[in-house]
Image (spheres, coloured by chain):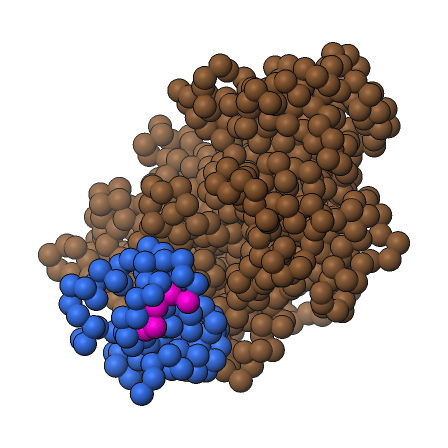
Amino acid sequence: MDLENQARVKALAEQYGSDDLIVILGGAEAESCGLTAETVSAGDPTFAGPLAGVPLGLKAYHIFELKDEIDPGIYDEQIAMMEMVMDADAIKGEVTTYRGA
Amino acid sequence: MRFPVIKGAAYALIHANDMVLHQGSTQTSEARLNPGSEYLKALPAHLRSFQEVVAYPPNQVYIGNLRPAALKAIPRPWRENPVSGAGREGKFGEIMPLDEFYGLVKAADMFDLVLMEGNYQKATAAKLATHSAVADWKTLAALEKGYAPPERIRELVAGGQAEPMYLAGQLIGCVRKAHDFDAALSEHVMFENLVSKASAAFCLSLLLRKTGLPATAVEYIIECSEEACGDMNQRGGGNFAKAIGELCGCVNATGSDTRGFCAGPVHALVEAAALVRAGVYRDVVVVAGGASAKLGMNGKDHVRKGLPILEDTLGAFAVHIGADDGLSPILRIDIVGRHRIGSGAAPQAVMRAIVTDPLDQGGIPLADVDCFSAELQNPEITEPAGAGDVPLSNYKMIAALGVTRKDFAREDLAKVVERIGMPGFAPTQGHIPSGVPFLGHCREMMLEGLLRRVMVIGKGSLFLGRLTNLFDGVSLVVEKNPGGGPEDQARVGRTRVGLTLAGSEHGEAEMLRGALLAQERDPAVEVVAIGRAAPPGLALVEAADAEAAREKMESMLASGELDAAVTMHYSFPIGVSTVGRVIAPALGRGMYIANTTGASDTSRIRAMLKNAITAIAVAKACGNETPSVGILNVEGARQVERALTDLRDHGYPIRFAASGRADGGAVMRGNDLLRGGPDIMVTDSLTGNVIVKLLSAFTAGGDRETLGDGYGPGAGEGCERIINIISRASGAPVVAGALSYAGACARGDLPGRVAGEFALARKAGLDKALAELAGPVGPAAPAGPAELAGPAGSVGPAGASAPSEPAELAGPAGASAPPGPAGAGALAAPAQAAGGERKEQTATPPPPKAVSEELTGVDILVLEDAERALWRAGIYATAGMGCTGPVILVAAADKEKAIAALKTARFL
């Protein structure tokens, strides 16, 4: 996960606490989405960024998982095409893994 | 419209493995930030040999020896399946080894910045001296002298004064800084710029050699790499283009640089095409060299995964854009796609802006694009680096966009991706993969008829420049050259209108001015001049004189090479007459004058009724679906008004205009003519003719028509061709107007509109109305007085309410017109002058001949009798209407005999 983004997530979690904060992902690949989900939950597994050893316990969702929460018109306008292009099931499966119970 | 074409494309790769290590920014950054890097230690073992690079399948596709689709048949990884027997020479270009390329860098150096070790320099000079594309570079002479001592090179490099040139691990030369402290002229920048310049020039030379384009013919060069040349006061001041052209001997060219990150080449193509289309330059080259900084960009991933360094080649391309040759693929600059500043960043918005918006604008269904050439990065390079298969993602996005728009069914998604795409094969040199690498194949495949339409897409990540977060994208459609076929012309959306040049009272130059004016004002029209000569920018079909021009015009209309034509002198058969278009001076409104030449009918009043219907068809063809109709207050106006009202009452949709005068009504006064009250002013041909001349020439002193669109298209039932008439007095603006008018009639399917309009009128009782207007022609019918009472009497409604006299008697020869046979209907009585005998109304024509001679002087009232009289005399003849009145048309060989016969029968 991008180091700058790690820093931003860390700062937001410190400001607002972890209880009412989720992270929404828009990544194109399951592996990188999973890595990001892991980073914001258990800490940076590569130990390269500000979240190394900092388990924020944040839940990450890919935007595809939040389809029901979004106005269908806007979803169609902004997301529907890419949902067809990407391997949405693999991404969802990977991201879910890191949310725990 | 003639579109610019792709006349040729060339591609070059330079195997630059030593540069990967010493100039690739990933490696130089690593060396600076992480001295003793394990990656840098491991890297040399991952470099490929020249033969491996040559035999690498994507590289063979890039230089044209394999089609992109061939990669589908080669198992991945391609690096493990080399092309057997592959050579460095390609159909479109070449793969050059580094030792030769360094020689080109030296030859590209005009400021003695490149130093080379003597033995190496001599060996390279010998190789380049026999190279088929660059041997004639004058600057190769620089390789013949100035050998640098190796220690001097080492000293400069070690002292930070020069960028090293390594070959197989040996330091053989260097590029010195061009200024003591100017960072824009540092050794590093100068090295990159010289590499870019030399590789681009190499590729331009390949283009010249492979296409036969003389270097001296190039008029403009657009360079579109991602480098910047200039000094600290104008970093990026340019001009790579001219520097490249200089090396290649393009002494007649100038040029400039276009930048747009990876979208730059497609921007440059659009610009080149526009310059050619506008006639600014005839032969334009778009060129770009390679980027040494990008070598080994993803090297860390490649090394980590045990792969060779696949980013070991510099890429270059050159494309020649020229005027239409009737053969090469055309560039549809009328439907260029662009990601607008306000388009938005969502992938869907981006693809809409670049792909579907322009296609929608051009009326081309997404499914009608054979394939897309978008970001052709070799996936074998990008996938190990986590960037996926870039071309495949593009094809998926285009197909998915098509699904959201319902262009494709969702279940066909995979099939569509397969059909519209191709495997990526270009080196990841930024601007190089974006759209252009396919142009060479595309040209060849279109010439072979394998492809019809391709969209070329360039995309750029502008945010890398840290001035904006925006993204960019441009697209351009390439199509198989229609080559002048009528169907293809219709497809490309331009109407070809012929113009015969001979016969104008103002000379052919005035006609040509009108033609150029038409093309300038009306992008929907392409004018084809038919005559002796035409200026650049105007298509010419040669014809020595007026007669030859007329024949050429007829044959081209018949074959569909022309959609319509404009001419000065043309004889339409009875039943066809022209609907003119003028500008009414009071309010500047356009107004159709129905009609202006020819005769819709031998009866003047029946002709006026038909004129109204014909003109409605013309107005509809030109886009006015509900034209208002007024009838000019000439003799017979009230009869025509009654007939049209009857038709309306029986269901014919007609909208009457109202006179601007106090008493209103659909019968128009002279004032309404000046005001342009109705959209259509119905009158008889001769009056209409006078009106057009008057309203066209009154501001120009009378002898030159400068306003309006001329006398209009000949139209009538069964008339399938669109021929617009102008007069010998028509000036350039009227010629231009007539060309546009003719083009609009062709696009609006005038013949179809006329047929449809008459069918509607027939349903509402047109035939009955025509028969009533003719009326019985009895012996008691007054021959002349009724006609003469018209003009002599009041001009108001009273005069027009004259008894419904047989129309035949209202002719100009009224006084001498004889009583007709009872119930003769439409046909006129025989001429009294012919001896008072009643002629047979029927006669069998002799076998048809080509009739080209016009005999004038026969009265319109007895025109058909004269025709039949000639038939009986064994002479084939047809009655028609010329510009100045009725004519009998006969074959040239029969002319004298026909005149004699007509004189004998007192028709003349």
Closer to the camera, B765 or B441?
B441
Q: Is residue B112 above or below residue B661?
A: above
Residue B183: quarter of image: top left
- Name the residue at 45% across, 58% down: B354
Furthest residue toward top = B146
Closer to the camera, B96 or B365?
B96
Q: Is residue B522 visible?
A: yes
Span shown in magenta: A41-45
- Name the residue at 64% across, 41% down: B20
Residue B805: quarter of image: bottom left
Q: Which chain is blue?
A: A
Residue B808: quarter of image: bottom left
- Name the residue at 69% across, 38% down: B18
Closer to the camera, B458 or B613?
B458
Give the left or right position of residue B625, taking residue B80 as reference.
left
Q: Is residue B768 above or below residue B1?
A: below
Image position, residue B246 (x, y; %):
65, 22
Image position, residue B202 (x, y; %):
71, 33
Furthest residue toward bottom = A101
- Name the residue at 58% across, 78% down: B414
Furthest residue toward left = B662
Image position, residue B62 (x, y; %):
71, 51
Examine the residues drawn in magenta and state their main secondary structure: loop
Colour that chain B carries in the picture = brown
Q: Is residue A81 visible?
A: no
